[in-house]
Amino acid sequence: MNASLNPVTRHDWTQSEVTALLQQPFNDLIFQAQSVHRQHFNANRVQVSTLLSIKTGACPEDCKYCPQSGHYNTGLDKEKLMEVQKVLDEAKRAKEIGSTRFCMGAAWKHPSAKDLPYVLEMVKGVKAMGMETCMTLGKLDEAQTQALADAGLDYYNHNLDTSPEFYGNIITTRTYAERLQTLSYVRDAGMKICSGGILGMGESIADRAGLLMQLANLPEHPESVPINMLVKVEGTPLENAEDVDPFDFIRMLAVARIMMPKSHVRLSAGREQMNEQMQALAFLAGANSIFYGEKLLTTANPQADKDMQLFARLGIKPEAREEYADEVHQAAIEHAIIEQRDASLFYDAAAH
Ligand code: SF4
């Protein structure tokens, strides 16, 4: 049996192994990824999350892909931290449209002492609605991490973005080591980790392999691995970056699936640019999570009704939390799609 098909979860991947996985013939790779996927997941279920920006723009970090960075002029409206009740209203709506996880993101270097109490109230409120909670707030210290865990936060999103070697080309205001430290605090506090990266920033195949190695060689795999395609936003330094070959993007999803067989691999930012065939191929490669809503943070996201039409055509159903019967969940989604069309507050997976 091919070692990569062995269901044992590994944490000792080498650069040459991962590069070889990425470069094998496409059909072999997809077959292998789908085979691994079926050992751990229902191949016809996709987890659906909703993302809300609770504080937009004017971020002091200089991530070259990000329209929210205060270092670049992207014409984005800056907003203060959203009121707790407004966040809870959005969460309620997300639940009604069938999302099982509500992700809240703030464009901060780190949460301040002034803002944290409000953020904790948001976590408690969303949790009380019976949804899973996820936040992305930048770098955390140990006490902040514990406070979030105590409030009931399920997931913390903090992306590694790329390989350690390429990272300095993209971000200079926060180190890779700081990112790993935040992830370690999150794990130690008992929360689940959402961490992934972005393709299309000028990275090499070795850098893509390096990112996946970092994620898979963590002491525990992140439960959620968002793989983003760069959304080129005017005004950011990467606005003219070269396009990624769509098949290379699919390869990345497939290798993430093989290396982290029990994680949800999320087809994340950049989905707007993908046609339905490519999204179907992404699901075949083992992607089993999407963000759902009209907008990811500051960039367009395919509309929810289109998503559901595609799911229906592919025979895919949204992954339900255990307390929901599938039919109830599906009916709620279908009903709410109609009301979803004017939603406008959804957040980007690429942040942080
Ligand atoms: S990705 Fe996150 S940390 Fe980086 S500039 Fe954007 S909001 Fe700030």
Image (cartoon, rainbow, N blue to C red):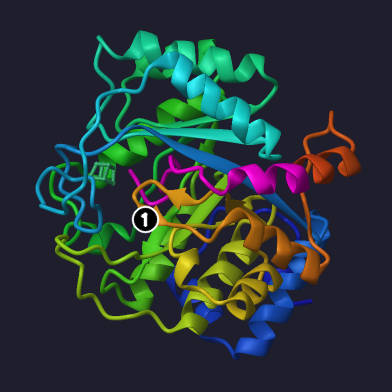
| Nearer-the-camera pick, 124 or 184 | 124
Q: Residue at x 76, y 59 (%)?
A: 7
Q: Mark 1 = which residue? A: 299
Quadrant assignment, res 320: top right
At label 1, the amino acid type is Thr
Whether residue 106 is visible here, answered yes or no, is yes
Image location of residue 193, percent across then percent down: 52, 37
Task: State yes or no: residue 349 in magenta.
Answer: yes
Task: State yes or no: residue 100 in magenta.
Answer: no
Image location of residue 105, percent across then percent down: 39, 34
| Nearer-the-camera pick, 292 or 222 | 292
**Mark 1 neighbour density, 10 Å: few (under 14) some (14–19) many (20 or more):** some
Q: Residue at x 14, y 64 (%)?
A: 237
| Nearer-the-camera pick, 24 or 110 | 110
Q: Residue at x 23, y 52 (%)?
A: 67
Magenta stretch: dominant SS?
Answer: loop
Quadrant assignment, res 242: bottom left
Quadrant assignment, res 141: top left
What is the count of numbered marks? Answer: 1
Q: Is residue 264 left or right of residue 173?
A: right
Image location of residue 305, percent across then percent down: 65, 57
163 up-or-down from 339: above or below: below
Q: Answer with the quadrant where ligand 1 appears in the image.
A: top left
Please report the bounds of the magenta region as a residue range.
333-352
SS class, disc 1: strand
Q: Quadrant of the C terminus?
A: top left
Whether residue 189 is visible here, answered yes or no, is no
111 up-or-down from 237: above or below: above
